[in-house]
Image (spheres, rainbow, N blue to C red):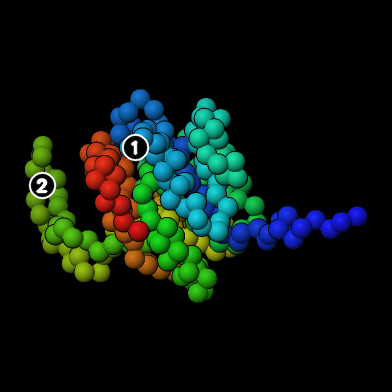
Amino acid sequence: MTEPPESAAPGPRPDVCVIIPAAGSGVRLGEQSPKAFVELHGRTILERCVDQISGLDAAVVVVAPADLVGEARSLLPPQIRVVAGGAHRSESVRAGLAAAGDAQIILVHDAARPLTPASVFHRVIDAIRAGHRAVVPGLPVADTLKAVEPIGDDLALVTRTVDREPLRAIQTPQGFTREAFVAAHADDAGLATDDAGLAERVGIPVHVVSGHPMAMKITTPWDLSVLRRVLHSGEVGS
Ligand code: CTP
Ligand code: MG
C-alpha cells in the first residue's frame, strides 16, 4: 500500500481562534437586514470582515443571528464555523467560545469593524505570544474631551476638561490567552460589550497596541456611508 503524499496529511490545528460576533440586529444602523448582512460596496459587511483575515493562520467562528445561520454559512468559505448567537453580545461571544475548540489564543472581533487590516490582528497576536494575557488595539483620541453635567434639552455644563494624553479609543480584535478569556467571562452574567473590561474587572492586566483608522466601527448610517466612500475611492489601508 502506498503512503499518502505528505501534503495530504492534516497540518497542526491553528492555536489561534478568531470569534466574530455578528448576531446583533443593527438597530442604530436602521437597515432592513441585521448589520452584518447589510451590503458594503458589493458584498456583505460579514463577508468583508472575514475576507480581511483570510490569510491569517487562525480558526474562525462566526456568531450569526439564530435565523440567519444558514444564510451566513452560504456566504462564507466552508472552513469557517458558524454558530447561533444570543440576545446580547456577551451571550454571542460565549456561544463563539463554545465552538472555539482548544485554541490557546482567543481573539474577539466585531463584524461591525469589517475593514480592519490584518496587521492589527498580527500586532494583537504577537503581543499575546510575547507573554501578555489580554491585548487590545487602540488609537489616541484626537478630539478635546470635556466632562459635562446635562442641564436641559441639548444643553450641558462643562465640569472639567479631561487630559486626553493617557486616553485611547479601543477597537477590536481584542485578544486573550484562553485562560484569561475564560476567567474574564466566568464572572459575567451581565451585558458586557467590552471583553477587555471583563478581564480588567478580574484583575487581568490589559495591554494596548496600535489600532488602525480603518478598524472603525459601523454603528450609524453615517459610518456606513464613510466606509462605502472609502471603498469606492480605493483608499483601503493595510
Ligand atoms: N452582537 C452579537 N450579538 C448580539 C449583539 C451584538 O453578536 N446579541 C455583535 C454585533 O453583530 C456587532 C458587535 O456585536 O458585530 C458589536 O455590536 P453593535 O455594534 O452594538 O451591533 P448591533 O448590536 O448589531 O447594533 P445596535 O446596538 O445598533 O443594534
Ligand atoms: Mg448593540
Residue 156's tag is 2
Disc 1 target residue: 40
From the top left corner, tell me how far across and down residue 155 is, in percent.
8, 43
Q: Is residue 70 above or below residue 113?
A: above
How far is the residue under mark 1 from the one under mark 2?
Answer: 36 Å
Q: Amino acid at mark 1?
A: Leu
From the top left corner, tell me how far across and down residue 159 is, in percent.
12, 57
Q: Contact, CB < 8 Å: mark 1 with mark 2?
A: no
Residue occupying image coordinates x 37% and y 67%: 209
Q: Amino acid at mark 2?
A: Ala
Q: Secondary structure at mark 1?
A: strand
From the top left corner, tell me how far across and down residue 47 is, in percent.
45, 40
Callout in the foreground (1, 2): 1
Dividing the picture into quarters, in which one does residue 227 lie? Answer: top left
Taking depth in this image into account, of 152 and 1 the one nearest to the observer is 1
Q: Secondary structure at mark 2?
A: strand
Q: Is residue 78 left or right of residue 202?
A: right
Q: Earlier in the sequence, mark 1 or mark 2?
A: 1
Is residue 237 among what the camera can see?
A: yes
The residue lying furthest to the front in this view is 2
Crowding at dot 2, Cα within 10 Å, few <14 / some 14-19 / many 20+, comes out as: few
Quadrant the N terminus occupies: bottom right
